[in-house]
Image (tube, rainbow, N blue to C red):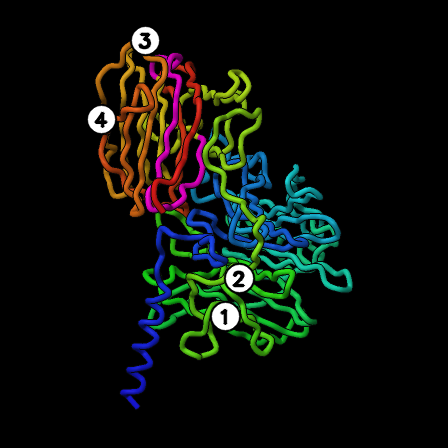
Amino acid sequence: MKRIKLICALVLFFAVKCFAQQTSVWGDLGNGAFRNPVLSSDYSDPDVIRVGSDYYGIASTFCFSPGMIIIHSRDLVNWEIIGHVVDDISFLNPELKWNQMKGYYNGIWAGSLRFHNGMFYCHFTTPRGGWFVATTNDIRGKWNVQAMKDRNDNELRGKGWDDTCPLWDDDGQAYIIASNFGHYWFPHLYKMSSNGTKLEDGMIDPSCDRKKNIEIIGGYITKPNRTAEASKLYKWNGMYYFYFSEVRTIHGNQVRVPVMLRSKNMYGPYEEKLLIHSQGKDVDLEPNQGAIVDTPDGKWYFVTQHGTGNFDGRMMSVLPVTWVDGWPMIGKDIDNDGVGEMVWEMEKPVNNEQAKESIQTTDFFSSSQLSPQWEWNHQPRAEKWSLTERKGHLRLYAYSQLEKGSFFTTGNIISQRYIRYGKCEIIIKMDIRNIEDGQEAGLTHFNGGRDYSCLGVKNDNGQKQLCWSKKQSQDKDVTFIKGNTLSHNIRYIWLKTVINFSGEAIFSWSFNGKSYHTFGGKFQLAWGNYRGSRIGVYTYNNRVEKGFVDVDFFSYKTLTR
């Protein structure tokens, strides 16, 4: 018997290892198959729905604005960015504005996306700002954003709630579930108004301190477990399904895993089932929070983040779902115990030859509106950037950092997500003629408030110089290197960074866009405050609010996959 158990364990070990390869080859393989992740980038806390033959998804954005990114696909594998839900994130919480910048572990967390009676709904929270709902009848257009209210019409602004999701039942009654991560970190279920904006059986406890936690009287706790979160509500074939994730010990590892409750009644009693095992951070990277969605021809899939973030963030994968005895099993049941494991490569969910969407990266700034891949570091000063003052250029005006010498308090940083390839190259062409005394501008890698590196041009007492800086979270001080003084007749400079699959970045510069010279040291992209690495352009001036830089283009291309 011991020999049989040992053989089974070895078979499982090698089977898991065979499926446990995160490589630089990912997404659509061009042969009718795909390889996970489908997005090797920071698309965290995803929720996905199908409307007809179109798939729409959202992902959390924390302190970056515009907030709550929206993506679209026709096959669940190839995705494009189509917009954002929140134009001005300071409406959610003034701490997210350029003059406070307290959002690196704040801002927009996980939300839900639903389509009901011709209207799209996005319910979401900010951990210190409150509970919100956004609605639109055009998902590519403008959203109306408002604070959710309790049954007494009090706005649910304050601390303590996350991971919200609604359900409109067959009889017209609406419900919503949310997790309270304060004193009672449990999923709470409430009745909701049909327009999705108000709790019908929940009211704010008048004695609670909203600055510490909003306590809501009423509702129903579906899962009294301290680590249960990431809730989703579904109804299939007359059964109610409550999806959530929680921390469990699986194969000796403390991991966060997907779990499901089900019942014929909204308020139980519930049955419970684990949907997928996790082999741990080093094997499958903990697929957990996500959404279950079907295809027009009746196949089912789970769109998930990998919860243990690396420098590329919490990347997004698509796993098969098999219905067994009325339960959705995620992945492939390698060891025949009724619970799935991670799958890295499989047939595409929809074989749609027209599905050629791809995440936008390169930008020549030829439009009067920003391309949707761009997000600002906190809510920006509207008058400090322009796409129209010089056609075909992004103009960034310099102003002081909130804390002089602290890169993460730089207001004028515009960036997009790093996408992990085998090797990639980013180049910007920048007009530096109007960089004023005290101003610095350039190209940067940074994450959610811990690690950064920059290659830029700094004007110090009328002398323009190249400068390189680096700060890793383990470093006590910032590393700063200055180069030789640049000639006054230099108009343009090209700044480049090349990143390998291990996340090592090396900067270089050029005066003609052809011959490049390495400058500074190696920088290791990193994960910080639940954010993967980003690539952006920055400027600031800590001496005087003066000077600007014009960015001609931002080129982002793959060298190897």
Label 3 crowd bin: few (<14), some (14–19), many (20+), radius 10 Å = few
Up/down of 26 relative to 467, above or below: below
Q: Is residue 125 left or right of residue 196?
A: left
Residue positioned 36% across, 67% down in the render = 279
Mark 2 or mark 4, earlier in chain: 2
Find disc 3 in the rendering and name its residue: 489
> CB atoms at circles 3 and 1 under 8 Å apart?
no
Circle 4 sits on which residue?
A: 481
x%, y% of residue 89? 55, 37
Work out how far the residue at label 2 is from the one at label 4, CA to CA, in angstroms.
47 Å
Q: How many marks?
A: 4
Q: CA distance from mark 3 to mark 1?
A: 64 Å
Q: CA distance from mark 2 to mark 1?
A: 10 Å
Q: Examine the image and state in which quarter residue 543 appears.
A: top left
Residue 386 image point, x, y percent: 52, 21
Considering the numbered disc 1 on the image, is that residue within a helix, a strand or a loop? loop
Q: Are marks 2 and 1 in contact (CB under 8 Å)?
A: yes
Q: Nearer the viewer, mark 2 or mark 1?
A: 2
Which of the two discs, 2 and 1, labels the residue nearer the N terminus?
1
Helix, strand or loop under label 2? strand
- In what element is the residue under mark 3? loop
Q: What distance separates the C-alpha of mark 3 from that of mark 4?
A: 23 Å
User: Which residue, given by chain and number where applicable, does mark 2 sit on?
Assistant: 302
Tag 2: amino acid: Phe
Q: Earlier in the sequence, mark 1 or mark 4?
A: 1
